[in-house]
Image (spheres, rainbow, N blue to C red):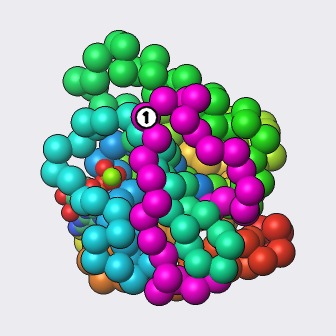
Amino acid sequence: MDFSKAQFEKAYGTLSQLPPCREPEIVFSGRSNVGKSSLINKVFNRKNLARVSSVPGKTVTINFYSAGGGVKIVDLPGYGYAKVAKTEKQRWASMMEGYFKSGRDIRLVVQLVDMRHPPTADDLTMIEFLEYNKYPFIVALTKSDKLNKTEYKNRLESIKTELSGVPENRIIPFSAINGEGAETIRNYIIKCAEENNVN
Ligand SMILES: Nc1nc2c(ncn2[C@@H]2O[C@H](COP(=O)(O)OP(=O)(O)O)[C@@H](O)[C@H]2O)c(=O)[nH]1
Ligand SMILES: [Mg+2]
């Protein structure tokens, strides 16, 4: 894998367009506005690899990138944006289900949760889905720079209970601003892409 070679390939808006899986995939999942595009850009050291938006939840697409060395990055559509129409929510569900059911070589799911707040019901549903289906995953706690020392300590402590099934070393505070956690996430990605083993 060569992180500097990461490149946007295509955005898919309908299930039938979704390409068959030919290479290992590293997947990014989280609610709209959680900081997914910012994390992808930071982890892959690129300013505009994924688009950072202040208007969340606009389009439901699954975005594919090549990560170099025959590995794909998959940016799943964000969830939990209140103002999204019901038809869009259904499209989201069908895209997600279609993606996970299309027999893919999923090496690692990076599940994003906003560090400032307890996981949302949707976050928990997603994490339970990953656990139940035994997908290897880590949880990135985003926007860690927005908490002061006390808040940081308290949230990190609480999240261990809120996500009691998730091993502590797979819960990683992250900031796209100061780079906290980026190296740890990179190492998980490299390890999983190469070995298919999260431990
Ligand atoms: N302070 C801070 N802001 C962030 C961080 N990550 C994302 N943001 C901001 O949160 C908003 C949503 O980010 P974006 O990456 O577009 O989220 P996405 O919808 O999940 O892809 C933007 O205004 C970002 O600048 C972070 O680590 N720290
Ligand atoms: Mg985004």
Residue at 35% x, 69% y is 49
Residue toward you, 181 or 161: 181
Q: Which residue is mark 1?
A: 13
Residue 116 visible in rendering:
no
Of the 4 image quadrants, the one containing the N terminus is: bottom right
Write down the region rendered in magenta.
Answer: 1-26
Q: Residue furthest top?
A: 86
Asked whether, in this view, residue 33 is left or right of residue 67, the answer is left
The answer to whether residue 19 is magenta is yes
Residue toward you, 61 or 27: 61
Secondary structure of residue under mark 1: loop
Asked whether, in this view, residue 154 is left or right of residue 100, the answer is left
Query: Residue 33's spot in the image, x, y percent?
Result: 29, 48
Q: Is residue 95 above or below residue 37?
A: above
Query: Residue 42's spot in the image, x, y percent?
Result: 38, 76
Location of residue 24 by image quarter:
bottom right
Query: Residue 63's spot in the image, x, y percent?
Result: 46, 51
Residue at 42% x, 64% y is 8
Residue type at mark 1 is Gly
